[in-house]
Each structure stands twice: as structure tokens, then as C-alpha cells.
Amino acid sequence: MSTLLQPLDVTAIRKDFPLLSRVLHGKPVVYLDSAVSGQMPLPVIERMSKYERDEHTNVHRGVSTLSQEATDFFEAAREKVRKFIGAGSIKEIVWTRGTTEAINLVAQTFGRMTVKAGDEILLSAMEHHANIVPWQMLAEEKGATLKVIPMNNAGELILDSLDELITDRTKLLGLIHVSNVLGTVNPVKQIIARAHARGVPVLVDGAQAVPHLRVDVRDLDADFYVFSGHKLSGPTGIGVLYGRLELLEAMPPWHGGGSMIRNVTWEKTTYLGAPAKFEAGTPAIAAAIGLGAAIDYLTELGLDRIAAYEHDLLAHATERLERIPGLRILGTAKEKASVISFVVEGIHPHDMGSLLDGDGVVVRAGHHCAQPVMTRFNVPATTRASFAYFNTRDEVDVLVSSIIKAIELFK
Ligand code: 7TS
């Protein structure tokens, strides 16, 4: 941990998360499932509740004071997102329902516009289904093919062959920034530079990166960067598509309806510019404002301090888990975020998940919407613990004891 960084006051932070004082099956809840969905701190919940109690109306409509006020809050949240990820303009920040919708938007606008029969879309071997299926659907529609950057047994991408995998027919590279299964932090800046050298635009799935690392889309030189509010201490129902402005301007609209038009006649409709062009209909206003409040909260704590703290939890958990006989961690990359997937000989990951649940320890068991990763590691599923800035070393120790107890039970 950097000596320049004041450590986080986790005891104080935990008071902001009411769920952490719940009791499950007679045990204090140990929430190790932030990769599924982060918990929202009270300032976020209270900001959304204030909006719903005192300020609720629609945005971008009418001259009423209430509507103008709501529009200001909503657009202020967009500016918070812009600043948080280092984008150049709020025109580059499109609200979506989440990461999944953002990728579908790009596939069905940019993708449909650029991908033709015989073209290729390059993805990495560790993508979430959200960054596979929309491209597969597009490839089927257009007669294009998907190609895959392989990974090694540690869960690191093998980049030696990248220059051969990129061809003259490659229309897009889709890349997960941090793996939701393996925790691997991919060298996206370097990969983007290599793709750009060949004229290939890159979409980065940042769903698991933004909660853990400081992200600067201009420094990365990403063409598209997407993430979800609910993994970033914010609510569900809101997410972000960052797109380079010239790309967004060149893309056709996606959904049609109110709020995205300049003029409508029976003969022809003209559209607004980005981002409004992609935001038909009434958006998730309270959720957007809540995401803005979450960004304020995280910024106040400091992403660097969060990263340092979570890194310590990850190191502690890795060290303790590695000592358990029969337990195998999937994903041992040099650069990792605070996600640990594991399997234990003779115990199905779902059984492990249920036994941990009985001890109040909340983890996820399953394929984590990344079945190709399961296939690559030859496992049907894993159990996954993911750590956030409100978790403690003591909670890691509860996880470890609970796993040991489960192993004893299966002997
Ligand atoms: N991309 C990554 C890397 C993710 O981890 C997830 C959700 C998504 C995309 C989809 O996000 P959504 O908000 O649109 O649903 N990941 C997980 C997970 O790991 N376990 O449950 C959801």
C-alpha cells in the first residue's frame, strides 16, 4: 500500500451499508458477491429516495420548474460520469440500462453499419456472455465470423498471436477489462494501441473494472467503454455507453420514439445528435441520479485507496485459500482485481455455495455468464467470492473457515 494513501476507515464505511448488519441463518451476513451486484451506500439510497419523494417528474420535457430541476439533476449525473471516466464531452455519455444493453446498442448500430459478409469480430477468450452473444447474433445476420484471442492456464490473454488474429476483415475488437470469473486485469491500453495500429476500433467491457480501478477512456484510447451502475455502488436499471464522439455521430439511432427526434412528419423523421439520439423514451431518472451519487461517494473515498485496500484483501484471501488442500483457484494472473473463483475436489460448486450460504456467506456459484471460460478450464462451474471496499480481513477468514467446514462435511 502506498505510504501516501490514508487507509480507508472501513468501520465507518460499513455503517453506510444497512444490509451488512443483517443476520442470515443465524449468522452475520458476509457479503462477498459484489461482482454480481455491489451494495449501495446510504447516501445513494437517500439521494434516490429524495428524488422520488420531493422531485419526481420527467426530464427534457416542458417548462415546469420541476421538470427543469429534474433535467438538471439528470444531466449533472451525466457530467459526473464523464469526469469519472475522463471522457472529453458529455455528448459521449449515453445512458443505457446496463452493460448488456450498451453492447447490444453498439452491435445493432455501429455493428450493423460496418460489418458485412465475410468480416470478422475479434473477442477475447474470457468475455462475459454480454460481449459474445450480441456479436454472434450480428455475425449470423451478416454472415460474419467471430475470432478469439486465447488465454493461458493462469487466465492471461496470449497476445503473441494478436497481430495474426487481426486481419483486414476485422471490424471490431471486443475486450473485457477485468474478468468477472478470473479477476484478470487485461492490458487494455496496450491491446487498443495494437488494434488501432491496424485501424480496428475497440469496445471495452468495463463492468468489473470501474468499481476497482481508476479508468480514463482517453488515456486508454478506447472507442467504446461500457459499464453498469449496479456494480459501481449504484442502482440497477442504469448503465453507461461511452463512445468516441465521431463514432456516435456516425452511428444510426437504435430505438425510435420520443426524446430522440429533431422533427417528425409522416414522410420523414430527423434525429437529435448524440447522446439523445440513443435515448428514446423516458429514462431511468432516479437511477441515473443515484449513479451520480455513487460516483460522488467513490470519488470521496478515492479509487486509489479503494484499489489498495481491495488488493490487500485479495492477497490475504489468496494466501489463505491456497493453503486449503484440494482447493484450486481459477485465475492466477499477475494483475488481478478482487475476484476469486475456485473449485474444491469432490464438492460441486453449487453445493459449496449453498453450504457457505448456510453460514451467512454470500458468494456466487455457477458459470458466471462465461461458459466459454468454464469450457477452457474444463469445469462445469466455480464458486466465486468477490471483495469490495466494505469487506474486512475478518470476513475473508469467515469464508475460509466456512470452506474448511464444508470440506470436512464431505469427507
Ligand atoms: N460484463 C461483465 C464483465 C460482467 O461482469 C457483467 C455482469 C456484465 C457484462 C453484464 O452486466 P449487466 O449489468 O448488463 O447484467 N456480471 C455478472 C456476474 O459476474 N455475475 O452476475 C452478473
Image (cartoon, grey):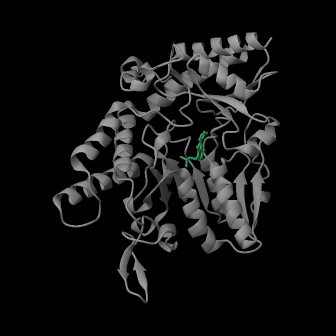
389 and 344: which one is in front? 344
Where residue 127 sits: x, y (%)?
A: 68, 48
Q: Residue furthest bottom?
A: 267
Quarter of the rendered structure image containing ligand 1: top right
- Asked if residue 170 shows in the view, the reply is no
- Tell whether 233 sits left or right of 32: left
Query: Residue 103 at what x, y percent from top left?
Result: 57, 57
Residue 281 vs residue 105, the one in the foreground: 281
**Residue 376 horizontal side relative to residue 298, left or right:** right
Residue found at x 44% / y 59%: 94
Q: Relative to 411, is 265 above or below?
A: below
Horizontal side, residue 326 vs residue 354: left or right: right
Q: Is residue 267 above or below residue 281?
A: below
Q: How many marks?
A: 0
Say whether residue 329 is left or right of residue 299: right
Q: Is residue 226 visible?
A: yes
Q: Position of residue 411 (x, y in %)?
A: 80, 11
Q: Is residue 109 above or below residue 78?
A: below
Q: Residue at x 77, y 43 (%)?
A: 151
Percent from the top left, x then y, of residue 113?
Answer: 60, 74
**Residue sitting at x 41%, y 46%:** 84
Residue 152 location, quadrant: top right
Q: Nearer the viewer, residue 245 or 356?
A: 356
